Amino acid sequence: MARTGDTALKTTMRSLAVRKYCQPSGYEVLELPVPTITKPDDVLIRVHAAGIMTGDTQMANGMFRFVAKRDFPYPISIAGAGTILAVGPAVPATLTPGTPVYGTYFEHGLFPPPCPGFASDYTVVPAAYLLPKPPNITFEEAAALAGTVLTAYQCVCRYLALTGQDPDSGDTATLAGKTVFIPAALSACGSAFVQVVKHVYGAERVISTVSTGKMPLVAELLPERTVDLLLDYQTQSVVQEVGRGQVDFVLNTQWDMVGTFPLVEPEKGAVVSIASVPGEETVRAILGDSKMPFVWLLLWAVRAVQWYYNWRLRGTNVKQEFLSGNMGDREGLERTGEWIAAGKIKAVMTVVDLDDIEAVRRECGKVAAGKGGLGKLVIRLV
């Protein structure tokens, strides 16, 4: 039997959802049934704020419909923050009714589990994906940081492994003496990534980009001395300004990963990307025993793209790898939760209310397009 608080639940709730695959202009606030606890490790949450990622909009528009079929209405958002209302019998004692929590529920970006629909009044999430919310941050800030800080940590660990360093060295791992390039300093991921490499791992030089209109906002929205060289990608050539071979580590957040290759130090540099085509080994690991039709065609396409990447890197020893992020990494989740609680990472976000559906559609459209947004989009429910 679930352990519950004193709050009486409704039978229906507001939920940002789609009735069919569509762009953000088709998003609606629907009345859906309140989810219930069905597994021993389930946690029922009254959601206060939900984060919207590019992947949320991609799932809603059917980008992965051939490999991950969705039922409709389909609720949106895999990340958020709220207050626990009830827990299953196997949930640890650190998570009890009344506890504020935050988290992100997916394992691999290509084939996430059924969407928890954080942009709803209530959601059910396995306890392993949640952390208690620190009292020094708001629900909106927690929703903005959920998932992105852990992904940054995993990217740094992968870079260390690719370059022959020990990613398991815990608090002694460092990027001291390294130059790191991360595009889009004020994007949802980029704003967290630049802070992690600078203020947690101590990178010597962090280089990033923004559009012309956002240049003055970087000093305002990010902690002091986060970005050492800020470039306007609309008027400046990153390669010309930085120089070829001057970057040790590219942590790529944009689809033009190949455009960053000239920056990388040719003998010992590496690129870890969250926005590129994964390698065959990664795809096979994600697919597992999937019976998806035409797997051979997908693997052929992946091999072809990897061949192209390697051709573009010919004559160098540069390593490149895609990383989708894994929110089931409990050790990493707890470590990055400590950074957030200590105030090492500041949330950069745009907040809109669920009841303002036109604002929700407009801002989700920016997320889907990858243009015009500012930080993580957060939808406030309470």
Image (cartoon, helix red, strand yellow):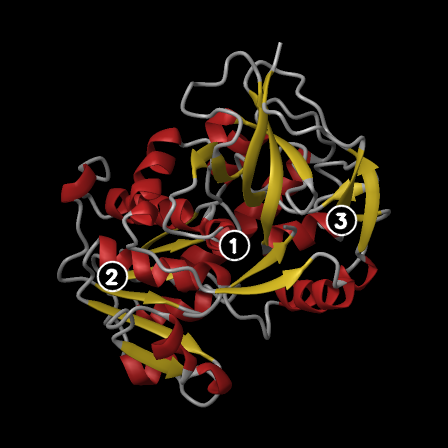
| Amino acid at dot 2 | Lys
Q: Earlier in the sequence, mark 3 or mark 1?
A: 3
The residue indicated by pointer 2 is 198
User: Which residue, as the protein is rendered here, is positioned at the far front?
Assistant: 6
Above or below, 184 against 344 in this view is below
What residue do we see at 61% from left, 51% from top?
55
| Residue 105 is at least partly visible in this image | no
Asked whether the beta carbons under mark 2 and mark 3 sit within 8 Å of each other, the answer is no
**Quadrant in which the N terminus is drawn:** top right
Q: CA distance from mark 2 to mark 3?
A: 36 Å
Of badges 2 and 3, nearer the viewer stands 2
| Amino acid at dot 3 | Gly
Image coordinates for residue 333, horizontal then vertical, percent: 38, 37
Image coordinates for residue 68, horizontal then vertical, percent: 71, 36
| Amino acid at dot 1 | Glu
Q: CA distance from mark 1 to mark 2?
A: 23 Å
Local crowd size for mark 3, using a 10 Å CA cut-off: few (<14), some (14–19), many (≥20): some
Circle on res. 140: 1
The residue indicated by pointer 3 is 62
What residue do we see at 18% from left, 62% from top?
178
